[in-house]
Image (cartoon, rainbow, N blue to C red):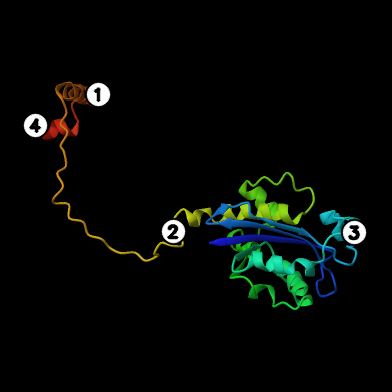
């Protein structure tokens, strides 16, 4: 199964109010193994970030001035994501922004291009009700090293999310066989006739029998002659 961990950074909190995506980070997981086939873009949002947003991601307006616009890279992004299962922390936020960006370039909504979306925030709330379930909190709880996360960054957060998800679902995968795409997924009962097999009988030699008897005598002595095998032998 091809899974993509996705995160965005934006100019603010309101996609409907005109805020834009300024960074997209994607990390690919194939059959629960990181492939290194990641995607990372910065975009010129054609507007400045809000002061509060700058404090979160630290990506200056000046840095983004010469970056490509989302429209210039939309086809590359959709080709990368096509048909994959997408995993996002607080998916409604990121998808809301991506839907607006796709709408601007005349594309269908985000979910029309992928197989499905998993929200790890929803997963975490079900697994840890009443607890903090931010990405940082999950990293701490699951032993994922997030010491390099002084500011939010889309690619770094997607990488951390991949580690978090693998830890969140590790117990499920331990019970499953790793079946490749070209193998049948059905199970067939097979009966094997064992009557034709000759199993060798390995008997203890004299020294092994003597050592065994010595151990039994020691056990018999320590129990005051009350060992089960002695009682059965004299019965």
Rounded to the nearest angstrom, the CA distance separating label 3 from label 1 is: 83 Å
Q: What residue is pinned by disc 4?
A: 234
Rounded to the nearest angstrom, the CA distance separating label 1 from label 4 is: 18 Å
Rounded to the nearest angstrom, the CA distance separating label 4 from label 3 is: 94 Å
Q: What residue is pinned by disc 1?
A: 222
Q: Is residue 29 left or right of residue 201?
A: right
Query: Tag 4, which secondary structure?
Result: helix
Rounded to the nearest angstrom, the CA distance separating label 4 from label 2 is: 57 Å
Foreground: 22 or 150? 22
- Residue 179 tag number: 2
Foreground: 214 or 157? 157
Which residue occupies 59% across, 56% down? 29
Q: Earlier in the sequence, mark 4 or mark 2?
A: 2
Q: What residue is pinned by disc 3?
A: 61
Q: Quadrant of residue 235?
A: top left
Q: Earlier in the sequence, mark 4 or mark 3?
A: 3
Query: Tag 1, which secondary structure?
Result: helix
Of badges 1 and 2, nearer the viewer stands 2
Rounded to the nearest angstrom, the CA distance separating label 1 from label 2 is: 54 Å
Q: Are marks 1 and 4 in contact (CB under 8 Å)?
A: no
Query: Tag 2, which secondary structure?
Result: loop
Q: Earlier in the sequence, mark 1 or mark 2?
A: 2
Q: Earlier in the sequence, mark 3 or mark 1?
A: 3
């Amino acid at each position: 199964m091809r899974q993509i961990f996705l995160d965005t950074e934006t100019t603010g909190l309101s996609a409907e109010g005109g805020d834009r995506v300024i960074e997209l980070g994607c990390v690919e997981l194939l059959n629960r193994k990181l492939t290194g086939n990641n995607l990372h873009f910065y975009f010129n949002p054609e507007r400045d970030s809000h002061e509060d947003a700058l404090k979160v991601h630290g990506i200056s307006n000046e840095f983004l001035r010469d970056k490509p616009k989302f429209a210039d890279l939309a086809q590359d992004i959709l080709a990368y994501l096509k048909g994959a299962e997408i995993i996002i922390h607080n998916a409604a936020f990121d998808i809301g922004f991506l839907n607006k960006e796709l709408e601007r370039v005349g594309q269908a909504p985000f979910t029309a291009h992928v197989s499905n979306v998993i929200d790890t925030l929803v997963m975490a709330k079900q697994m840890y009700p009443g607890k903090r379930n931010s990405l940082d909190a999950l990293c701490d709880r699951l032993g994922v090293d997030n010491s390099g996360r002084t500011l939010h960054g889309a690619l770094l957060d997607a990488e951390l999310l991949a580690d978090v998800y693998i830890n969140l679902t590790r117990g499920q995968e331990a019970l499953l066989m790793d079946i490749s795409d070209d193998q049948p997924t059905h199970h067939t009962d097979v009966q094997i006739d064992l009557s034709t097999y000759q199993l060798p009988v390995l008997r203890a030699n004299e020294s092994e029998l003597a050592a065994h008897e010595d151990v039994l005598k020691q056990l018999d002595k320590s129990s005051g002659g009350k060992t089960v095998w002695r009682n059965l032998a004299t019965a």
